[in-house]
Amino acid sequence: MNIYEKFLRLDRRYIFIFVAVGVVIPLIFPMGLAVSTSPPVENVYKEIQSLPPGTPIVLSVDYDPSTEPELSPMTVAILRQCFSRKLPVILMTLHPGGPGLALDISHKIAQEMGAKEGVDYVFLGYKAGLSAVILSFGQDLRISFPADYNNVPLDRYPMMKNIKSYNDIGLVVTISGSTFPEAWIAYAHERYGEKIAAGVTAVMAADYYPYLQTGQLIGMLGGLKGAAEYEKLSGRPDRGLKGMDAQTIIHLFIVLLIILGNIAYVFVLRAQRRGAPGPSGA
Amino acid sequence: MHISHDIWVWIAAALTLCIYSFLYKDNPFYKFAEHLLVGVSAGYLLVIDYYNNLLPNLITPVSKGMGVLLTTGQFTGSLAALVPGILGLIILTRMLPKVGWMSRWALGFYFGAYQGLIITGAMQANILAQVWGTFVKGGNPVFSVALFGDFFAHPGFGHIILAISGPLMIIGVICTLTYFFFSTEHKGIPGGVAKVGIVFLMIGFGASFGYTVMARVSLLIGRINFLLTDWLGLIR
């Protein structure tokens, strides 16, 4: 067996070891590789920066723990920016796996930024119904959420006094690992003209570029890279930027493997066509 | 190194390592962690749905309505929640072969109501707006001779990209849609156009695959970060 055939038959567990080392070493010994920002992420940042202080934002945490490593960093970064700009945040979730994550993040970041529940943010909790809930916000969000997650009527909170529907909300940011942003676009944007920004996993990001193209989304954060870009823009490095060194190393490793694999495949194919003994079953 | 003293961090770390042990080969530790995940997820979602949906939307209004009915003999609007409650129970008859046909009533109602709710939004957002956006962006046509004029006046990479991206997108959309048009045989001109559509599709799949690889690596980074930061305390 020549070297090319050996390479094509390489035990995948060696690749797993290299990937593990490629992730661990940059996390322990950061290299500080440069991260560039892209227009979709910049647009979200600029939109929130441009909102006058006191303009409410809806932050919908529509994901579960399976996508937490990608989406929580962007949720944290956006929440920090909102609190620093004194923008009241209406936290909610349309995903049943979301309440625990949203509660955890809101408490942690509120404590860090000195934000108070009821004054700077409220957490409405989870409500099933997706499109029905989104549509109800067009009339009065109290139709779906008469009380918050702690069962306190919304009217008892000072920040909710002048907030009734989309007319009183400056921006909706939906963080999701599935198709929730499509529902927000279809009902909140198309029906009521609300501005929508989305934070999505990298798997879903490719599917949402058409909505960026049409302007149905004002901006989008895609995956951990999107979170890293947002952290860079807001000047608060956290998990997103920390993971970029490892992300770069692994991507380069994967590109190298793909190139070497294709070169090996071409040589093996040539040898087979020349009639040389090739790998059995290949 | 500051190893965590939190039992839950240790449990999470142990379960993470159990799952990753599958990378070597399938083993009982992986199977245990996988089954635990399925069970805990089902239990957690059941409790969330009970307290956030069943209790406030069905049990509480029906019990209040029944209380008023039994004490005063008056029907209240909250008893209307019985209708969706009964429809939901009828769907469960699907599991009983003799009366499973009843579930079609409830499912038919659900599908009809849902289709009526989504069809306008989906049509507007996913079809009409997308067709419009293929040809117009920000109020300007994506195919503009003026952009080509800018390129020839000031040759540069940025200008050529601006000039050709619009026509390229229109060609890509038309060719890709032609590939999925099966009412005519893909021969001659339609065949050629469909082949160009395949090229665009492959480029799109490649971009999607690259994004997927990035997503999986990000999830790995997240878990390794947890092990090194929260569990072992190697990173601050």
Image (spheres, grey):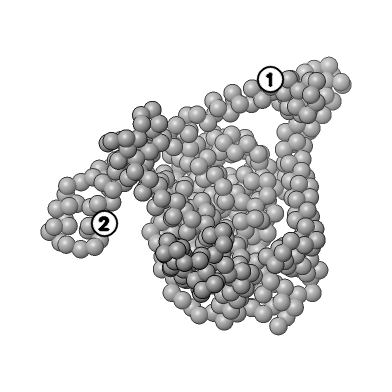
**Residue type, mark 2 in image:** Ile
Check the image and report above or below for A75 versus A161: below
Q: Position of residue B152 (x, y in %)?
A: 13, 57
The residue depicted at 79 percent of the width and 24 percent of the height is B97
Q: Residue furthest right?
A: B71
Vertical relation: A94 (above or below) B7: above
* Residue B126 appears in the picture as rendered: yes
Q: Residue furthest front?
A: A275
Disc marking residue B105: 1
The crowding category of the residue bearing disc 1, from other C-alpha atoms within 10 Å (few below 14, some 14 to 19, many at least 20), is few
The three-letter code of the residue at mark 1 reads Trp
Query: Which residue shows up at 60% across the image and 49% down it?
Result: A62
At 37% across and 41% down in the image, what residue appears?
A: B176
Left or right: residue A9 versus residue A197 is right
Give whichever of discs 1 and 2 has the lower sequence position: 1
Mark 1 touching mark 2, by CB under 8 A? no
Residue A87 seen in the current view: no
Residue A271, position as x, y percentages in the image: 44, 66
SS class, disc 1: helix
Image spot of residue A15 (x, y percent): 58, 70
Q: Which residue is mark 2?
A: B161
Near mark 2 (Cα within 10 A), the count class, few <14, some 14-19 or many ≥20, is some
